[in-house]
Image: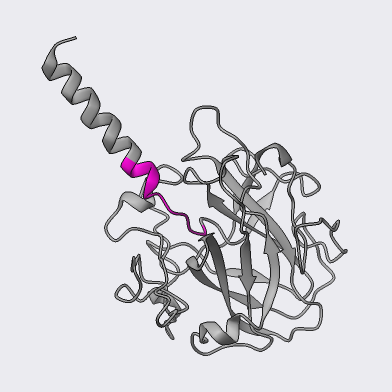
């Protein structure tokens, strides 16, 4: 191999390592409906998405897990000095795409953005995210927190308030492994909405702790409607199997070899 070829290979390797080191995650789909609710899968053939985070670019034609290389990137890292709950495109150590509250739904959902999720009280909901090289054996799984208020919202709540309203804690490394590609590996988890919540628009937050006090969040809304005597594969209100990792709600860790 020539010196030039060697240098090019070295640069490519370093670029890849940097990309892997700086790769951080976000909520890809906030209403993922698996084909098999009893053993959820997170790959494209394992289910379908019915709801997305705010201003999620569904028509970007980007590969699953690639939105961190866009400008603005999708992941948002909070600044410990203020812990802004949802990215406004400015705050944070890594601002990310805008996910702050918009009174007009058309500014966050529909058109070039994904649809807003809808649900009924007690419904089981699943969220999906890309592993971004962090669902590996040598990294500690600090978990994903699903936060939501007890009443409908007309704006984004402070992080201190959301932390008092944690609905579920899910294992981050609950994934469908892709051999040789830990970056685009799909992961996810499920939880039940409270059975006693009233109808209205609720703010939700996906909050992942990568390292101690290093937090990444995604925000979305769910329109909760009054219960109906109709059900589908994702509307079960039966208690989900309890796992040791979850503090509230449930998880779906069926690939424990990654934990």
Q: Residue at x 70, y 73 (%)?
A: 167
Residue 49's place in the image compared with 184, above or below, is below
Q: Return the x and y of residue 115 as percentages of the image width and height.
A: 51, 65
Q: Is residue 14 magenta?
A: no
- Asked if residue 241 lies left or right of residue 217, the reply is right
Quarter-of-image position of residue 125 = bottom right
Q: State how the image is colored.
A: one colour
The residue at the far top in this view is: 1
State the predominant SS element of the stretch in magenta: loop
On-image quarter of the C terminus: top right
Front residue (pair 203, 137): 137
Q: Return the x and y of residue 208 as percentages of the image width and height.
A: 55, 62
Quarter-of-image position of residue 105 = bottom left
Residue 229's place in the image compared with 164, above or below, is above
- Asked if residue 114 lies left or right of residue 204, the reply is left
Q: Residue at x 62, y 48 (%)?
A: 173
Q: Is residue 24 magenta?
A: yes
Q: Residue at x 52, y 62 (%)?
A: 52
Q: Residue at x 63, y 69 (%)?
A: 146
Q: Return the x and y of residue 69 as percentages of the image width and height.
A: 31, 49
On-image quarter of the N terminus: top left
**Which residues make up the magenta segment?**
18-27
């Amino acid at each position: 191999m020539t010196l030039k070829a060697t240098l090019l290979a070295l640069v490519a390797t370093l670029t890849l390592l940097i990309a892997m080191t700086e790769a951080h995650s976000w909520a890809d789909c906030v209403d993922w409906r698996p084909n098999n609710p009893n053993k959820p899968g997170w790959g494209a053939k394992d289910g379908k998405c019915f709801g997305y985070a705010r201003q999620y670019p569904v028509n970007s034609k980007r590969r699953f897990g690639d939105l961190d290389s866009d400008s603005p990137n999708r992941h948002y890292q909070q600044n410990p000095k203020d812990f802004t709950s949802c990215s406004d495109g400015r705050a944070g150590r890594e601002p990310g795409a805008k996910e702050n509250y918009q009174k007009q739904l058309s500014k966050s959902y529909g058109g070039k953005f994904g649809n807003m999720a809808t649900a009924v009280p007690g419904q089981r909901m699943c969220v999906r995210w890309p592993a971004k090289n962090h669902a590996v054996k040598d990294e500690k799984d600090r978990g994903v927190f699903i936060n939501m208020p007890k009443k409908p919202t007309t704006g984004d709540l402070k992080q201190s308030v959301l932390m008092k309203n944690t609905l579920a804690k899910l294992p981050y490394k609950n994934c469908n492994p892709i051999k040789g590609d830990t970056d685009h590996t799909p992961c996810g988890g499920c939880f039940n909405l409270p059975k006693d919540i009233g109808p209205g628009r609720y703010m939700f937050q996906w909050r992942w702790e990568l390292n101690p006090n290093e937090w990444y969040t995604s925000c979305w809304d769910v329109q909760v409607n009054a219960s109906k005597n109709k059900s589908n594969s994702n509307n079960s209100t039966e208690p989900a199997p309890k796992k040791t990792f979850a503090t509230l709600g449930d998880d779906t860790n069926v690939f424990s070899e990654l934990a």
